[in-house]
Image (cartoon, rainbow, N blue to C red):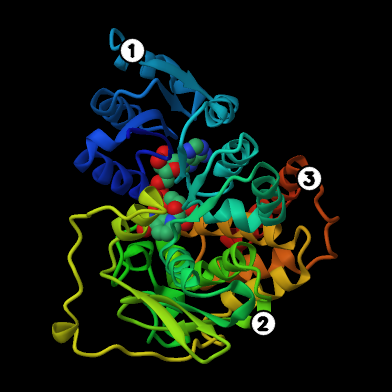
Amino acid sequence: MTRRLSLFGATGSVGQSTLDLVRRDGEAWAVGVLTANSDVAELAKLAKEFRPDVAVIADETLHGALKGALAGTGIETAAGAEALVAVARQPTDLVMAAIVGTAGLAPTMAALEAGHDVALANKEALVSAGELMTAAARATRATILPVDSEHNAIFQCLAGGRIDQVRRIILTASGGPFRTMRADDMARVTPAQAVAHPNWSMGAKISVDSATMMNKGLELIEAHHLFPVGLDRIEILVHPQSVIHSLVEYIDCSTLAQLGSPDMRIPISSALAWPQRMATPCTPLDLASIARLDFEAPDEVRFPATALCRAAIAEGGARPAQLNAANEVAVAAFLAGRISFPAIVDTVRRVIDTDAPAVPASLQDIFSVDAASRAAAQHFVDQLEHA
Ligand code: NAD
Ligand code: MG
């Protein structure tokens, strides 16, 4: 039976991996929606191949260009943030949320409110608005299928027992490209070094987050929302080979793990096919040639981001939204060569070192916190740049 897919963030790393799987299993899927931020040429190319009902470009100034590129194809076009929300409500069997950053929050919420199952890659949305998103999913009985490899692993391991019989969730982390670097040397790392992840090929923002370990902190918050076992039952373990994608320990001391090559098409396929499985072109694990797997405790002195995230989610309310927004600004400033690598986490720390913002009751409240936090982070970035 053909299933309908709405894909948000089609031109990104997760979006392209999703389309690679859809392309190989074309009979199974009808793509209804494709979206991108500003890459009109790539969006138009994908639209001509996958023939969605509608292609949406987030940057409104590019609507004319998209219309021109798709003239005569019969594919509808739309542009802007409101259009993203409108198409998220459109009937579908599955929404793939693969936009990066809180830009993905409004369409993802709209999809959940419409009762659509969501394959969620866009972790920043859940970090900022986890309570609102999980409440929306409960209200409409929509399922959130985690795409993030660790959370997808945990989701799979939780099929082996009951969540109230979980003793620990162990979130694995590669440690990123600077796992063994001395703290002093981190002041000199370049954006090119930071985006060169040892195991995974990913978008620029998440690659920098992996290098600061902010990614693992955001994932801790993500896990807390997706798998409510209690924050003190979620631990982080550094595992440089990225073969074990996470583990779940039950009260009987059985520990279940999910393993696989570091290829995002594996967790993406798991979310696409759930509750079934689908064949993928991925490389099966050859454990004899891998020969060994290593583990170490995280170093929160050289990598303070995970502790900041744990404190932010323990405090709750708007604090995680504030942290996430500050991090998005700081990462962009680092990638633009404006601030140093250690200044990313310093900027986040300074922004969240304020009186607690009011507890958000609506998406609008989240957007207010997000905007204020971005402005504060921008202020610190400007200061650092001119220091
Ligand atoms: P990417 O930068 O490669 O792609 C991002 C996508 O979002 C693009 O299609 C872009 O056009 C779109 N986009 C960017 N800004 C936008 C805006 N303002 N409005 C609308 N659309 C916008 O990112 P990615 O690596 O594919 O990551 C996507 C999400 O998945 C992130 O939240 C990331 O943390 C998460 N994730 C990615 C990976 C991975 O391997 N790449 C793994 C786990 C989780
Ligand atoms: Mg991950």
- Above or below for 251 versus 30: below
Give the labeled residue for mark 3: 365
345 and 136: which is toward the camera: 136
The first of marks 3 and 2 along the sequence is 2
Residue 44, percent from left and from top: 30, 25
Q: What element does badge 3 sit on?
A: helix
- Above or below for 154 versus 291: above
162 and 244: which is toward the camera: 162
Disc 3 to disc 2, C-alpha distance: 28 Å
Q: What element does badge 1 sit on?
A: helix
The first of marks 3 and 1 along the sequence is 1
Q: What element does badge 2 sit on?
A: helix
Q: Residues within 10 Å of mark 2 (few under 14, many from 20)?
A: few
Q: Residue at x 50, y 22 (%)?
A: 79
In the rendered structure, which amino acid carries the disc numbered 1? Gly
Residue 14, percent from left and from top: 36, 50
Disc assigned to residue 295? none
Q: Quadrant of residue 131?
A: bottom right
